[in-house]
Image (tube, rainbow, N blue to C red):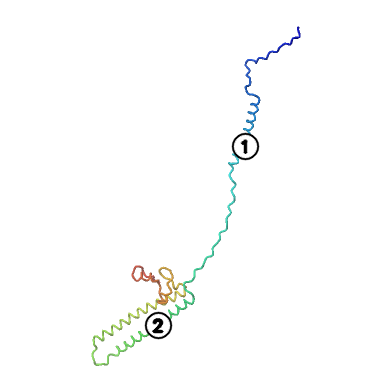
Amino acid sequence: MSGTPIERQPAVAKKGSKASTTPPKARGRTAKEASTSKKTGKTLTVKATKARKPAARKAATVKPAVQKAVRTPKPHLTEAELLKFRNLLLAKRREIVGSFEEIENEALRQSRLDAAGDLSSMPIHMADLGSDNFEQEFALGLMDNERQLLQEIDMALARIAEGTYGYCDGTGKPIPKARLAAKPWARYCVEYARLVEEGKIPQFEQ
């Protein structure tokens, strides 16, 4: 044999074997991307898990309730004013009792005269008799009014002792001092008293 080198022919791919069409570099990138995708997937999963956790709630701090100072309402009338109205009521009461005594004395005197009889021989005139009857009826009516007023005064004195004097029995509102000065035994304010007089509201009984 001669020393001429034998040329090697390229190897023929076997039938049935598929040649890889992916270049080596491409394979490297694909693997890297796959690795990155896996890592990214893990990261997203962790973040999503953290997002699902409920936020920790802070314990509600209960602040102690601050109690406001309760103001005591100022009395409608001072002690000096109550004493003043009490003296007015007592003075009026003495006046009424004195008038009662005068009326009673006059009635007693008249009854004695009637019992003794008229010593005069002159006949009694009908006008004089009517005048006497009128005076007696007037005196009786006056006594009834004074007796009712005396009762109002006694009730006013009782309200002073109880600490409810100066307030309307119908509404509970303070009665103006000017009205009490003019009528210390007043039980109602002007508005309520007008309704009582007109019969729109029944009178409060004690």
Left or right: where does residue 129 sit relative to residue 189? left
Crowd band around label 1 with a 10 angstrom C-alpha radius: few (<14), some (14–19), many (20+): few
Q: Position of residue 134 (x, y in %)?
A: 28, 82
Q: Amino acid at mark 2?
A: Glu
Mark 2 or 1, nearer chain start: 1
Disc number for residue 78: none
Q: Are marks 2 and 1 in contact (CB under 8 Å)?
A: no
Q: Where 189 sits versus 65, above or below?
A: below
Of 115 and 189, the residue lying toward us: 189
Rendered image quadrant of residue 118: bottom left
Left or right: where does residue 12 sit relative to residue 97? right
Q: Quadrant of the C terminus?
A: bottom left
Q: Position of residue 21 (x, y in %)?
A: 62, 22
Of 9 and 44, the residue lying toward us: 9
Disc number for residue 95: 2
Q: Position of residue 38 (x, y in %)?
A: 62, 33
Q: Quadrant of the N terminus?
A: top right
For the residue labelled by badge 1, is the local secondary structure a helix, a strand or a loop? helix
Distance Cα–Cα, label 2 vs label 1: 107 Å
Number of marks in picture: 2
The residue lying furthest to the top in this view is: 1
Q: Where 7 sits versus 190, above or below?
A: above
Name the residue rendered at 40%, 82% in the picture: 95
Give the labeled residue for mark 1.
43
Left or right: where does residue 83 sit relative to residue 100? right
Rendered image quadrant of residue 135: bottom left
Q: Amino acid at mark 1?
A: Thr
Of 18 and 144, the residue lying toward us: 18
Name the residue rendered at 62%, 37% in the picture: 43
Name the residue rendered at 64%, 24% in the picture: 23
Rendered image quadrant of residue 89: bottom left
